[in-house]
Image (spheres, helix red, strand yellow):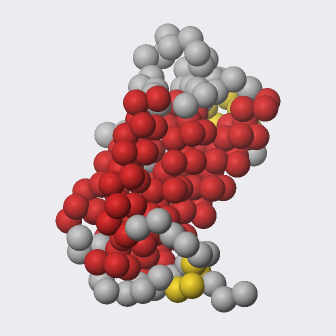
Amino acid sequence: MVKIYTKGGDNGDTSLIGGKRVSKSSVRINAYGNVDELSASIGIVASFIDDNEIRKLLEQIQEKLFIIGSDLADPLYPDNTNNIPRVTDIMVKELENIIDKYEQEVGVIQYFILPGGSKEASFLHLARCIARRAERNCVELSTKEKINHEIIPYINRLSDLLFMLARVVNKRLNIDDIAWHN
């Protein structure tokens, strides 16, 4: 049986796909670490949501986030000798279509809203913030190393979708969005 611990990272470095060792403080590790945190936060949301449609969607998103993590962990992009699944423009378009569908349900927002309402929506807003951080990390990485150019738009649309889902969940629970009063 393979053990969960390898002791290979005890000195502060880790392996990328293909075996290259890098510091755990590297921009690349930070980027896919935040994608992992995003997936975990979406898992928390999914555990609270009774709406089967949205829960299944969140689980599908987690599957896609594993693709992003693998994509980011492969330093050989665009060479795919490691045979890693990649984020595609089709995946980005799928998110846009889902956003459009849910926006028809809740309508176009006319004002800023505070993150909150139901606990489910609150966790979706938290996941949205983590997605924004992951996006910033990926942008930073892209200024230093080559990455798949579809990753950043995907995470950007995902944060938009998480915002939209928070609104949908609140609406389906008959909870109004909390307007920002300025």
Return the x and y of residue 26 as percentages of the image width and height.
75, 40
Can residue 76 be seen in this snapshot? yes
Residue 169 is left or right of residue 74, and the answer is left
**Residue found at x 59% / y 19%:** 77
| Residue at the outermost left position | 52
**Residue found at x 37% / y 45%:** 97
Residue 176 is left or right of residue 76, and the answer is left
The answer to which quarter of the image holds residue 133 is bottom right
Return the x and y of residue 69 as percentages of the image width and height.
51, 39
Residue 56 is left or right of residue 163, and the answer is left
**Residue found at x 61% / y 75%:** 112
Relative to 123, say whether 27 is above or below: above
Q: Classify the position of the C terminus by image quarter.
A: bottom right
| Residue at the outermost right position | 144
**Residue closer to the observer: 118 or 68:** 118
The answer to which quarter of the image holds residue 1 is top left
Return the x and y of residue 148 as percentages of the image width and height.
58, 26
**Residue found at x 56% / y 11%:** 79
Relative to 86, say whether 11 is above or below: below
Relative to 103, say whether 116 is above or below: below
The answer to which quarter of the image holds residue 78 is top right
Q: How many marks?
A: 0
Return the x and y of residue 121 as percentages of the image width and height.
43, 76
Relative to 11, say whether 174 is above or below: below
Can residue 59 be seen in this snapshot? no
